[in-house]
Amino acid sequence: MSDDRHILLEIDELKTHYHTPQGVVKAVEGASLVVREGQAVGIVGESGCGKSVMLRSILRIVPKPGVIAEGKIHFRRKNGEMADLTAMDVNGRPIRDIRGGEIAMIFQEPMSSLSPVHTIGDQIMEAIRLHKHVSAAKAREMAIDILAKVSMPRPEQIIDQYSHEISGGMRQRAMIAMALSCEPRLLIADEPTTALDVTTQAQILALMRKLQAEFGMAILFVTHDLGVVAQMTEYVVVMYMGQVVEAAAVDDIFFAPKHPYTHALLHSIPRLGQRSTGQRLEPIRGTVPDPFARPSGCPFHTRCRFNDGRRCVTELPALRQVGPNHQARCHYAETLGLGGVDAPANKVPA
Amino acid sequence: MTQPIASADPILAIRDLKKHYGGKKHWSGAVSKAIRAVDGVTFTIYEGETFGIVGESGCGKTTLGRCIARAHDPSGGEILYTPEGEKPVDLAKLSQRQLKPYRQDVQMIFQDPISSLNPRMTLLDIIGEPMVVNGLARGKEVARRVGELLERVGLRAEYMVRYPHAFSGGQRQRIGIARALALNPRVIVCDEPVSALDVSVQAQILNLLQDLQAEKKLTYLFIAHDLGVVEYLCDRVAVMYVGQVVELAETSDLFARPLHPYTEALMSAVPPANPRAPSKPRLLEGDLANAANLPPGCHFHPRCGYCVERCRTEEPELREYSPGRFVRCHRAEELKLDGVAELVEASA
């Protein structure tokens, strides 16, 4: 069903490396994904898996000493042509038009990503006036308008307040207002609710769902919270050590995972209602490997329960098709027979 | 994991505990308004259980935990601790000197495994120092016991010569746990011990805490904001809202049928990790009440969907709804609130 929508963003074998005095950190090491117009795609992974670096590569805001070593990022511009973002000058006109204008980003920590010395209104109006040729008065009107759209209470007052004067939930609303002020076609949300309390998170997620329907934009939603992924996205990409290890529709990821890492993630998190089943958590053994010492072969083999000791250790598996619209990077994806989230409840009657 | 709690003895009884900040008279004559971080908290923890405290940031759960470990001095109330085979003592009233024998018994694990370990001390110093200070071990004995503890928490004994920076987040939290165990405590206050960790490491630490509890007969006061973790680990749970306990019950009862509208809102706000389970959060209006300027009546009434006139004027008491279940709501009897069972059913 999703396939007839235009491709909006296509990342093809992206490699972003950091050249540090201690050696090269391969933060992103061959990641590919596709976002279609209006689609909500989730990226799941632990800290250090390269998800934030990949997002920053899209907007070409990778901090030094990071460089895009290889790969292409194609983005469909407003006029319909596919532009390669990796080929653009980082300070040039085209990428600056895209940043904020066509692709907007909201960050995890609203306190540190808002300017403490400018009012909320100034920051939103700056974005508007950079991308639209309107008068200051008109920009202010638009800013109040967009604040009202994100359900900010008392927008006429908040617009003249500073970020320290409002609560965490309101700051995140202000961030979203700023991102949406120029009607982007792709919104990149980097852990937008991680720093918020659950009740505030529920408010923000409901708001984002409403706005996505209203604006018809695509969202690239990065999070480590599987609950947020399940509720907010239709397609999920799982990352581990800079690589995509599995990509599938959200139902397939949760009910029929094909990669041992996805499976392990699903079963290592205490979920509401799990107590009644009396199951103990199944942790993933060990920790994420040191980025300077990437394991040989499959990067997950050091922690994988299904490691065969031969092929997994020596040969890097390719990301390949394992089902309709379902990709996984595992030699044994088809034969492992991994269970999804509802499997235990069906199997164990006790 | 679940023990018959009624048969166990109380180990900690918190009675009307208060911690207020500010509210002092300035020399100019101005009086600042007191922030009531913890405002009259009462509950009892039984030996061997895991008692959970949940709430959002700013609800006073961390302050409460620190008061109980006497890292903060409470402004009022009692912390009745029952030492082994002795009469209860009120930890809240003891001076630092009088407190010393009991410090060994109540230890703490902190949220942030980076800032809670001294970067200039080796693991031997970090874990061994409390033993030396309290006269539990000297000389070579310290190293031997530190080695044992490190192995118990899943690290290697050789690591004791290293510094905290050489370890990952999960390993550092193991070091924090080893330090808490160094004095053979009876009660451990765990202040969000897994919320700073990666999801794949969380489960390792939770399982370790469970194993240690079974082995050493520990009592945990487990402070967290993640309801999934609390449900998994705790025998009984208290829900806090701006400095007060609004509901207290056994875990399965609380999650099956919450009695307080805030508990219901908290549970429904957790997005279920199942794409086919419908998420129907009861969205709360506005933000957490200001602890320096609390609304009259029930502190939750401005955000409550079930608010009636009485809630606006009369502050509810924490009352015993049924044996072992406490709730601070006027309308607990008449409301039929949804628990997580509905969510689980929907996903099955």
Image (tube, coloured by chain):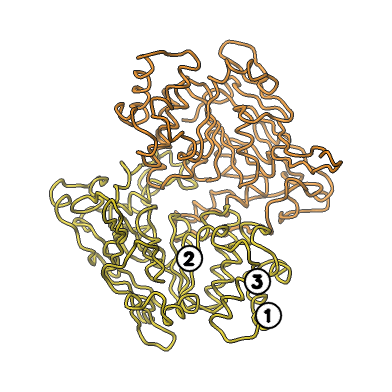
Chain colours: A yellow, B orange
Label 3 neighbour load within 10 Å: few <14, some 14-19, many 20+: many
Q: Secondary structure at mark 3?
A: helix
Count neighbours of disc 2 (C-alpha within 10 A) and say few if under 14, some if 14 to 19, many if 20 or more.
many
Counting residues from the start of the chain, the first of labels 3 and 2 encountered is 3
| Residue at the image position 68 percent from the left and 58 percent from the top | A165
Q: Residue at x 58, y 81 (%)?
A: A129
Tell me the amino acid under the disc marked 1.
Answer: Glu
Image coords of residue B53 (percent x, y): 59, 38
Where is A329 relative to A123, above or below?
above
Residue at mark 2 to residue at mark 1: CA–CA distance: 26 Å
Mark whose residue sits in front, 2 or 1: 1
Q: State how far apart marks 3 and 2 are (Cα).
A: 21 Å
Residue B33, numbered label: none
Circles 3 and 2 in contact, beta carbons < 8 Å:
no
Residue at the bottom extreme, as displayed:
A79
* Chain at numbered mark 2: A
Q: Residues within 10 Å of mark 1 (few under 14, many from 20)?
A: some
Write the residue at 41% across / 13% down: B138
Distance (Cα) linking label 3 and label 1: 10 Å
**What's under tag 2, amino acid-wise?**
Ala
**A258 vs B209, nearest the viewer:** B209
Mark with earlier residue (2, 1): 1
Q: Chain of mark 3?
A: A
Task: Kindly identify which residue carries mark 3.
Answer: A121
From the top left corner, tell me how far across and down residue B245 is, in percent. 68, 38
Disc number placed over residue A141 in the picture, else none: 1
**Label 3 vs 1, first from the N-terminus:** 3
Which callout, 3 or 1, points to the residue nearer the camera?
Answer: 3
Which residue in the structure is indicated by mark 2?
A: A189
Q: Is residue B115 above or below residue A111?
A: above
Residue lying furthest right in this view? Answer: B29
Q: Secondary structure at mark 1?
A: helix
